[in-house]
Image (tube, grey):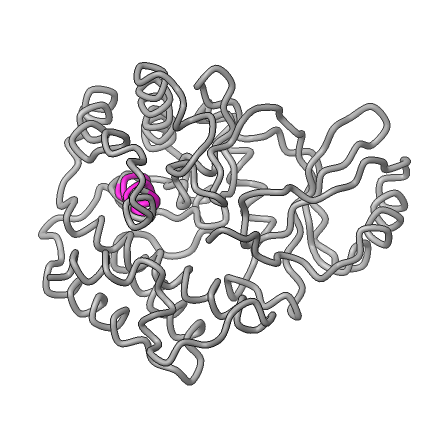
Amino acid sequence: MTEPMRTSTRDLDDLRERLSAWLGDDVSQLSRPSANGMSSETLFFTAGTSRCVARLAPAHEAVPVFPTYDLGTQFEVMRLARERAGVPAPRTLRFEPSAEPLGTPFFVMEREEGEVPPDVPPYTFEGWLLEAEPGDRRRLQDATVAVAARLHGTEFSDAELAPLGGRGLRAHVDAQRAYYEWMRGPTRIPLLERAFDWLEDHWPDEPGPDVLTWGDARIGNVMYRDYTPVAVLDWEMAAVGPRELDLAWMIFLHRFFQDLAEVFELRGLPDFMRRADVCAVYRDLTGHQPRDMDFYEAYAALRHGIVMARVWQRRIHFGEQPAPDDPDDLILHRALLERMLS
């Protein structure tokens, strides 16, 4: 994970002309971000005096990470999170459901300024978060947990949540199983199937209550200024399910990057995003004591395994690496997932 992954096959000059025609305004400074993001295509641009971001559903030839991209639902969830829950999601501007203007549906939102903990190279290897004072990192951690707490504590109507599909842990796991089946194609990945079996054997007695979850709840999807969240990004995995889905994802994704650092004999951030700290802050903010976290963290590792296997399939497709002899090696955190299941 030291080289950027290909995320688009579209020509920027063509996109600039099409976007200008759609907006009826001159588009300038069109570019792609240099870090983070492996699913939807992201474009930065200026329209008149406004600095904007466009999110596009990926082209089929780009070998998308996910089977479908419901940008209309993402657009609405971001609006609800910002306006109803007070979460600093970017201000949504326009949604275009037709593929005619740019060749695919897309939406436009305001662009914020700040720093994002990078994935490549991971923030546990180098950079501003690694170099921060411990108190500042803790402030960032607690403020990020507070984002999830604020979202989970907001009530939404059935009509508002209906576009997200099935509710609850069972519906969530069933959707992940369907995603795995789509992703794997003709090749079975035994470790991921073993993980699904492990979930059934360790199913929580009382999952829930169900809330609106962010889905991709991690610090790499947050823009910070002075260690405070100013933009909460990437809502394509939003769902209705137990609060622990977001908390476990937040904890596990840091564990994933910390494990990478230790593989390379780096110290990383071993005292950051620890389960006990995250759960204690969440409990203090909401009154809800997170439960069954072994289960939810193993589920997070499984979910991330499916995503990473798909990302590795993309790299193989574009000639960035050879196919492994063992399909379990498509999972970058194979050793970590094996330890968690045993």
Viewer-side residue, 274 vs 66: 274
Tell me if I can see residue 241 in this picture. no
Viewer-side residue, 333 vs 287: 333
| Residue 260 on image: x %, y % | 33, 48
Vertical position of residue 246 compared to residue 163: above or below: above
| Residue 64 on image: x %, y % | 57, 64
Q: Residue at x 72, y 33 (%)?
A: 52
Q: Residue at x 58, y 30 (%)?
A: 90
Viewer-side residue, 87 vs 183: 183
Tell me if I can see residue 92 in this picture. yes
Q: Mainly helix, strand or loop, the magenta region?
A: helix
Vertical position of residue 113 compared to residue 36: above or below: above
| Residue 11 on image: x %, y % | 80, 57
**Is residue 252 magenta-colored?**
yes
Relative to 53, is 304 on the left or the right?
A: left
Relative to 71, is 332 on the left or the right?
A: left
Relative to 220, is 12 on the left or the right?
A: right
Viewer-side residue, 74 vs 184: 184
Q: Residue at x 33, y 48 (%)?
A: 264
Chain part drawn in magenta? 248-257
Q: Residue at x 37, y 41 (%)?
A: 213
